[in-house]
Amino acid sequence: MVPTREEALSLLFDYTKTDSLRKHALSVEAVMRGYARKFGEDENLYGLAGLLHDFDYEMYPNADQHPYVGNKILAEKGYPDSVMQAIMGHAPYTKVPRETRMAKCLFACDELTGFVIAIALVRPTKLAGMEVSSVKKKLKDKAFARSVSREDIANGIAELGIPEAEHISFVIKALQDNATILGLD
């Protein structure tokens, strides 16, 4: 039996104490659920992958630990292989191929979602009225949110096979639809 969202939230909160990383998990979950609906896929599985992709990062931040330790924990708790495979693939250094649509979505959403949130945090209107052109302009500004990998964003979009503007628009809209939960309204 697949663990519930409530069980996943409990696991997230057990391992992740900072509000910013918890909100990142919730934001990636929101976008992943949106893509599951768009593609007619299992919304719960996509949501679990988004919610838990970084749950171990705070305690195990090194590349030889994250997401390996987290995936071991997920296996012990009975999470589906598809969720664990997607989580492993979201970190390019694991060299785990992203073969499923869920894995490709997670990789394409992770960095871009964080980037869009970073933009929202410096805007007076947060997510409201955010345009694709604003995101594309900020992507060119290497000084803005410099820790966000532009290469991973570009590679994720290419792997997902959706035009850049369409993907950015989708991410913005999914986050706008969840702005209250994310504290960005």
Image (cartoon, rainbow, N blue to C red):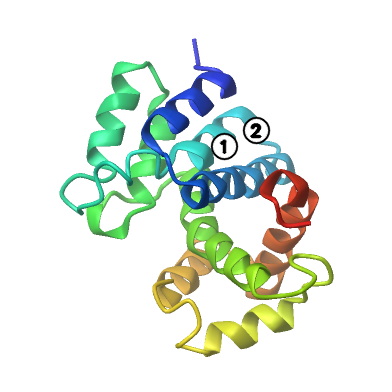
Q: Is 68 located above or below residue 24 in the figure? A: above
Percent from the top left, x then y, of residue 136? 63, 82
Percent from the top left, x then y, of residue 160? 54, 59
| Nearer-the-camera pick, 16 or 159 | 16
In the image, taking residue 67 as reference, residue 8 lies left or right, namely right
The 10 Å Cα crowd at callout 1, few under 14, some 14 to 19, many 20 or more, is many
Percent from the top left, x then y, of residue 147? 39, 73
SS of the residue under disc 2: helix
Quadrant occupied by the C terminus: bottom right
In the image, taking residue 180 as reference, residue 141 lies left or right, namely left
Mark 1–mark 2 contact, CB under 8 Å? yes
Q: Is 83 located above or below residue 122 in the figure? A: above
| Nearer-the-camera pick, 170 or 124 | 124
Q: Residue furthest left?
A: 64
Figure quadrant of residue 170? bottom right
Q: CA distance from mark 1 to mark 2?
A: 5 Å
Can residue 42 be seen from the camera position used here?
Answer: no
Can residue 98 be seen from the camera position used here?
Answer: yes
Figure quadrant of residue 120? bottom right
| Nearer-the-camera pick, 58 or 174 | 58
Percent from the top left, x then y, of residue 59? 27, 41
Q: Which residue is mark 1?
A: 46
Looking at the rendered structure, the kind of residue marked 1 is Tyr
Look at 72% across and 57% down and name the residue there: 184
Q: Residue furthest top?
A: 1
Q: Which residue is mark 2?
A: 43
Look at 39% across and 52% down and name the residue there: 90
